[in-house]
Amino acid sequence: MTVAGEVADHLAARTRWRPLEIAFWAAAAATLLLLPERHLILTQAAIFGLFALSLDLILGYAGILSLGHAAFFGLGAYAAGLLAANGIITEPLLALVVSGLAAALLGLMTSVLILRGADLTRLMVTLGVALVLGEIANKLDWLTGGADGLQGVVVGPLLGRFAFDITGHVAYAYSLGVVFVMFLAARRLVNSPFGLSLRAIKGNRQRSSAVGVAADRRLVAIYTVAAGYAGVAGALLTQTTQFASLDALGFERSADALLVLILGGVGYLYGGLIGAVAFTLVKDGLGNLTAQYWQFWIGLALVSIVLGGGRVRRLAARARGWAGRSPLRSGLRGLAGLAKDSKR
Amino acid sequence: MTAALETVALEKRFGGLVATRDLSLRVEKGARHALIGPNGAGKTTAINLLSGVLAPTSGHILLDGVDITALPAHQRVRLGMARSFQINQLFGDLTPVEALGLAISERTGAGADWWRRAGSRPGIVSEIADLVERFHLADVMTERTAILPYGKQRFLEMALAIACRPRVLLLDEPAAGVPESERAELLATIMALPADVTVLLIEHDMDLVFGFADRISVLVNGSLFVEGTPDEVARDDRVRAVYLGEAFDA
């Protein structure tokens, strides 16, 4: 092959659909028909997965560490809730778009805070934004219902035809469809010249400027997009549960997203999805087995996974070719990076 | 005629330390200009000021007569000034093909394109292929940069700067640390840079400096000490005293 041919092939390789990717989405589609009794929990998993994916866009691609990503999830959740409860927009898909845009706007406004500083600075700033927003939602109880949560969310039928019901089939199909479409868009974005410039900024910001990348603008753009993604996830949660509460903005939600993303692996989009599904199902399974002590077991599982990572990593390395990166390896690299930063 | 690159009374202080003092430098269009000086003379600080990594305390920088003192680094690149780094500043997770593709995309204004697949614009593939061949990167071009041998990384350093198609190119010790076996190849590549590109070279390797430059500025303690043709500088007693003495006596 000529050099040019190899260059073209190498650049195209990243966007080629791999068999495992196709299998992943085929399996997801199959759950629509094959696991009807699990649709309620799978809806939670899909929404959590989209939220973790939105965190991957900023952490895995642009290197922005956030412990307050729930700010955008929560804003989307409340926006969708308020639109429905007040009868402003009852059609869920349109309300979803509006809620996502609202969260994106908040992302745009707060993005200036994450342009400077290293990981720990960003960790604190993002955490702070989420705490402030949580307290605002708590204080504005005439609007948000405060600690009682937002009551009276009535979501109209999807596209005016498909009503959400108690079985959750419509809700699951809707959520999965939204997650898939948003995944496709994210996949395009990260493999574009824009996505390449994000990886360059993450890798070496000084050099990215020296080849002409306007780093600040790119970071603002991806932070805004990721906030919109998180907002859509939050709106999905409100619409499918017909309820919004302060949990949506809580620290635990931000931390869980970071956790599943690191477990699933950063920087290849599937990490958040896989991590979220595994986390939700394991949590649910443990909750059924031992309602009181599930946190003990999940903590133990996390520690063993991370410490036993070396052995699993070798297995993962053998099974590589998934999307160019083994999830555990990049996950562990993420953890190692965090540990390094906290020592700095 | 306007100079390709000019500094007017450029000064940079770090607290009490004056790293660059009243530096007025003129680099003519198409020149092969070398900036030399003993360690700590402020050569790298000067390049960092020129490229926008550092902001000067006072003074001005003109690129083709346009004042760029206040412009951020990425805008200077767009105006036609690129640089390489003394200590490799590369994208460890990107392959050489991706890194060069990035530089080309940014130059052509397609860097913010988020919908098109990277590498799908016409012309970009052949340009990347041309660069990897010119800079001897073809055999490693699909490897992660972080695992490339040091010599290859040095080539990529320069290739990235050239991919910006600069009119003015700042090379910060391109031969630093390059193993003897790969040195000749690197020097040949530097010699083969297009003639219409103005080059400002910082280098410790005197063979390279005197073989390459048509004009030399000697920097001492942050200020311009002597400037002239290679012959003039080589014959200058003051220069021999402060800097070249050792090399020339040997």
Image: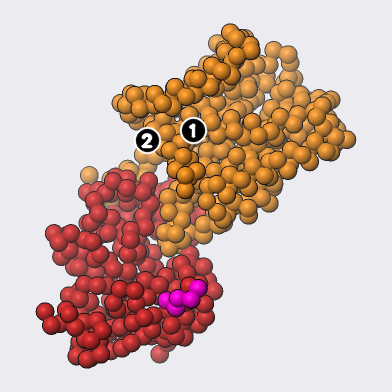
Chain colours: A orange, B red
Give the residue pinned by disc 1.
A262
Residue A83 percent coordinates (x, y) = 80, 34
Could you tell me which secondary element the residue under label 2 belongs to? loop
* Helix, strand or loop under label 1: helix
**Dot 2: chain letter:** A
**Which contiguous range is marked in magenta?**
B15-19
Q: Quadrant of residue A131?
A: top right
Q: How many marks?
A: 2
Q: Residues within 10 Å of mark 1 (few under 14, many from 20)?
A: many
According to the picture, the residue beneath numbered tag 2 turns out to be: A324
Looking at the image, residue B174 lies above or below residue A340: below
Q: Three-letter amino acid code at disc 2?
A: Gly
Kindly identify the residue that appears in the image at 53 percent across and 22 percent down: A299
Q: Main secondary structure of the magenta part?
A: strand
Residue drawn at point x = 80 percent, y = 29 percent: A147
Residue drawn at (47%, 29%) of the image: A264
Return the residue nearer the eye: B208 or A134: A134
Is A248 placed left or right of B190 in the picture? right
Q: Is residue B132 above or below residue A333?
A: below
Q: Horizontal placement of B182 versus A196: left or right?
A: left
Q: Is residue A25 magenta?
A: no
